[in-house]
Image (cartoon, rainbow, N blue to C red):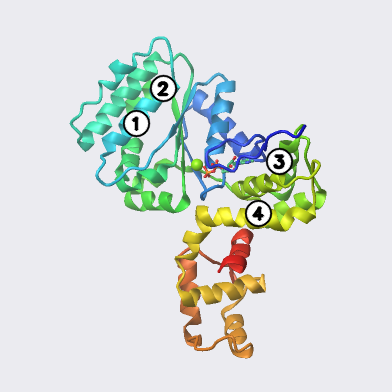
């Protein structure tokens, strides 16, 4: 019998097989040890959407707990300008109480520490008191707090500064042992740092989450398929790695579509085209359509050339192609440079050290070719 689809193309769903990330896990393990024996060095995990931040934090929770340190996972919801930092701090406190259940913990009593009058200095003193009292009830050498999706706090960005201020207080350093690991998108994190200068200096330990390597993709796919009754041909596995560049969400989504195309338990190259197309359509809904809509018509024209050429191009390459291939029509050739720079600013294309432009994501390139 063929088993149900084992892939997890849903944001926030832990993969059935957690691939790679050995360095990150060992860095976290050593952070745990030094936090328990010396003092905590709080961690920041940075990565774009779908790269695996949530899954990594949940893996961290497992590692911490297996070493005997209680850990709680707190997914931050989207806040608006109308919210106050105290609302966010209160949410974190609530999640901590749920994540650190202990016989001696009086959750209601602890939450009463937060008065409803929401001023900034209060958030700070109240959270300090909360940490001190909660720590008194935790029977362990260290407790870990995982805060996911910090970018959701951007409209009330001073929350991060409050967190920094509390965690750097003498009484908190001496009287508690909490290790925090925060995740954020890189652009939001740099905004936090710009706005609240000490934040960057306080959260100094950064961990950048990157794509999986080709070997990690193949073994993740292979191990996920174990005992399902389905096998992917070697060529198919290689193509998954090649097309996704090791982006975990794309790997899961593409593999999930491939899995659904099995015939007699086998997935070979004959089903590749259809599975790819379905994957691109879903990536479009998730992300690519909105990314592409940021480009003007002129910019899309250049983007299409870049997608068709399938290699990094310099400004002169674009110019020559426009002139020689008579692609230009009424295209304002003198402005090519500006259009390219604008595409780069919008995060749609990248520029390498030698000044050549490229589309960084192979799947996005395929999307442009098929749907623009
Ligand atoms: N190390 C990994 N190995 C295999 N799949 C992963 C890994 N990390 C994440 N994934 C998968 O990738 C997708 C996105 O992961 P997620 O943790 O939600 O990313 P983020 O929080 O950065 O948006 C999910 O489908 C998840 O199952
Ligand atoms: Mg996430």
Q: Residue at x 37, y 49 (%)?
A: 192
| Residue picked out by circle 1 | 91
- Give the CA separation, mark 2 to mark 3: 32 Å
In the picture, the disc for residue 235 is none
Categorize mark 4 by other alpha carbons within 10 Å: few (<14), some (14-19), many (20+): many
Position of 195 with respect to 223 (left or right) is left
Quadrant holding the C terminus? bottom right
| Residue picked out by circle 3 | 220
- Give the CA separation, mark 4 to mark 1: 36 Å
Q: Residue at x 66, y 74 (%)?
A: 309
Q: Earlier in the sequence, mark 3 or mark 4?
A: 3
In the picture, the disc for residue 244 is 4
In terms of image quadrants, where is residue 278?
Answer: bottom right
Q: Secondary structure at mark 2?
A: helix
Q: Earlier in the sequence, mark 4 or mark 1?
A: 1
Q: Is residue 196 above or below residue 17?
A: below
Q: Secondary structure at mark 1?
A: helix
| Residue picked out by circle 2 | 98
Residue 252 rendering spot, x and y as whole percentages: 64, 45
- Give the CA separation, mark 1 to mark 3: 35 Å
Q: Secondary structure at mark 4?
A: helix
């Amino acid at each position: 019998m063929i088993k149900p689809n084992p892939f997890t193309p849903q944001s926030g769903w832990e993969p059935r097989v957690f691939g790679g990330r050995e360095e990150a896990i060992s860095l976290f393990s050593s952070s745990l040890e030094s936090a328990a024996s010396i003092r905590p060095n709080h961690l920041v995990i940075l990565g774009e959407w779908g790269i695996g931040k949530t899954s990594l934090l949940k893996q961290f929770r497992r590692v911490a707990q297996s070493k005997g340190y209680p850990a709680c996972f707190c997914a931050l919801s989207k806040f608006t300008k109308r919210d106050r930092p105290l609302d966010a701090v209160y949410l974190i406190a609530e999640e901590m109480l749920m994540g650190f259940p202990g016989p001696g913990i009086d959750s209601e009593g602890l939450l009463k520490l937060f008065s409803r009058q929401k001023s900034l200095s209060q958030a700070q003193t109240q959270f300090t008191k909360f940490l001190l009292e909660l720590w008194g009830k935790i029977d362990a050498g260290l407790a870990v707090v995982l805060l996911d999706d910090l970018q959701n706090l951007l409209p009330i960005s001073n929350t991060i500064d409050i967190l920094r201020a509390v965690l750097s207080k003498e009484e908190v350093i001496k009287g508690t042992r909490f290790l925090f690991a925060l995740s954020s998108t890189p652009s939001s994190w740099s905004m936090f740092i710009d706005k609240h200068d000490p934040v960057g200096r306080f959260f100094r330990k950064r961990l950048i989450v990157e794509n999986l390597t080709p070997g990690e993709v193949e073994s993740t796919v292979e191990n996920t398929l174990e005992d399902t009754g389905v096998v992917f041909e070697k060529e198919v596995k290689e193509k998954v790695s090649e097309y996704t560049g090791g982006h975990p969400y794309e790997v899961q989504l593409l593999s999930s579509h491939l899995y659904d195309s099995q015939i007699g338990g086998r997935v070979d190259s004959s089903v590749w085209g259809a599975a790819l197309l379905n994957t691109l359509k879903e990536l479009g809904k998730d992300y690519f359509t909105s990314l592409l809509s940021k480009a003007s018509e002129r910019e899309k024209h250049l983007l299409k050339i870049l997608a068709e050429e399938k290699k990094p191009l310099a400004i002169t390459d674009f110019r020559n192609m426009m002139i020689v291939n008579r692609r230009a029509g009424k295209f304002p050739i003198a402005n090519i440079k500006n259009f390219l720079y604008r595409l780069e600013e919008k995060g749609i294309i990248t520029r390498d050290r030698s000044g050549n432009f490229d589309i960084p994501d192979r799947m996005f390139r395929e999307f442009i070719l098929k749907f623009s």
